[in-house]
Image (cartoon, rainbow, N blue to C red):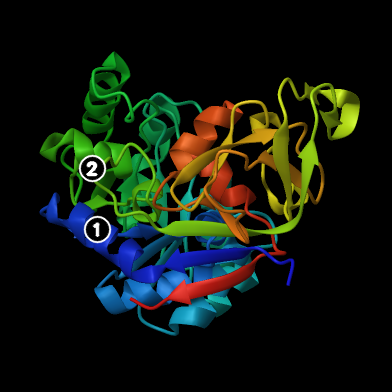
Amino acid sequence: MAQSVLTIDLGAICANWRALAAMNAGETAAVVKANAYGLGAAQVAAALADAGARTFFVAQAEEGVTVREALGPGPTICVFGGHMQGDAALLRDANLVPMINSIDQMLRHVETLPGHPFGIQLDSGMNRLGMEPAEWSALRDIALSQKPVLVMSHLACADEPSHGMNEFQLQTFRQMTDGIDAPRSLAATGGTILGPDYHFDMTRPGIGLYGGLPFVDAHPVVSLSIPVIQVRDVNPGESVGYGNSWVARVPGKIATISAGYADGIIRAMGPKAHVWAAETRCKIVGRISMDLIGVDVGPAKEIPETVELLGRHQSVDTLAEAAGTIGYEILTSLGSRYARKYIAA
């Protein structure tokens, strides 16, 4: 079978959630947007609910419907994107909580779903989503009179603990929210690690659940095993792959493995990335193509049947560095052709 196997350890995700929850005296939610960072929102959310998570965050109402179908009634599911045009039926029927980002969204919400739960998202300096201070000042009393379930903001530089933006946003968020009755939330994974000043009533980790930085103590969550289709000897002067971009300088042994950029293996990582054949690190050679990758398995003690791209030898962040990106993109790019195997929590 020439199908790669992506193994997802739900127990590791739950262990990471518990470890992050232990840093926080308040509630610890779980971010499962983007199909739980590419790993399967239904499976991940169900495992985290069993572990004790009671609040979940998604980006869009449609994602929230998927999570509600997996969890059933009970847990709170918040939508970062707020109440978009046409969302009313989804929000109502799946009992989702939009995080209102503007006066326009607030008006839409009270007109189409009066009495339906909502939260508020504030912009404390990131200039991405949420109400800026002036907009919040104009709406604050009206919004608070409707009893939002949460008032939140998002840190721009939490993965850099010494960055001055963290303290600036903390003070801005306090100025915007001190004295309100509603629960507050500022910290995702990075903010959780920054410490208690950033925790408020709820933290909402995302990438740390899935084994990514900045949570350096996270349990690894994913492994990716790719089958070898063919192995050939190459002589000095022979090239491998499109464009003759790699040419052998010495005799070598090249394995062609069954995956490529159609599976979310980012093409740009080719010149710097490696796979592992058992305990031997093997260099990717030539260009990563749509379905196939060349690997120099000459250093391996035995010709492998499969190689490891992600797993105990190589994290998502190591692979991301080779591609000039971040672990988030590696996870959310993982394609649909993998045979997915879940290890139960």
Residue 115 in view here: no
Determine the CA span between mark 1 and mark 2: 10 Å
Are circles 1 and 2 on residues that touch, CB within 8 Å?
Answer: yes
Tag 2's secondary structure? helix
Residue 119 in view here: yes
| Residue position marked by numbered label 1 in the rendering | 28
What label sits on residue 287 in the rendered view? none
Vertical comparison of 172 with 219: above or below: above
Tell me which residue sits at (22%, 52%) in the image.
20
x, y percent for residue 133: 38, 27
| Residue position marked by numbered label 2 in the rendering | 192
Mark 1: which amino acid? Thr
Q: Residue furthest bottom?
A: 72
x, y percent for residue 8: 47, 66
145, 166: nearer the viewer: 166
Quadrant of the drawing holding the N terminus: bottom right
- Residue 11 falls left or right of residue 335: left
Mark 2: which amino acid? Thr
Vertical comparison of 289 with 128: above or below: below
281, 180: nearer the viewer: 281
Neighbor class of circle 1 (other Cα within 10 Å; few <14, some 14-19, many 20+) is many
Tag 1's secondary structure? strand
Question: Residue 156's quadrant in the figure?
Answer: top left
Neighbor class of circle 2 (other Cα within 10 Å; few <14, some 14-19, many 20+) is many
What is the total number of numbered labels drawn onto the structure image? 2
Quadrant of the drawing holding the C terminus: bottom left
Question: Residue 289's quadrant in the figure?
Answer: top right
x, y percent for residue 198: 20, 37
Question: Residue 71's quadrant in the figure?
Answer: bottom left
Q: Residue furthest right?
A: 243
Tell me which residue sits at (69%, 30%) in the image.
268
Question: Of label 1 and label 2, which has the lower sequence position?
Answer: 1
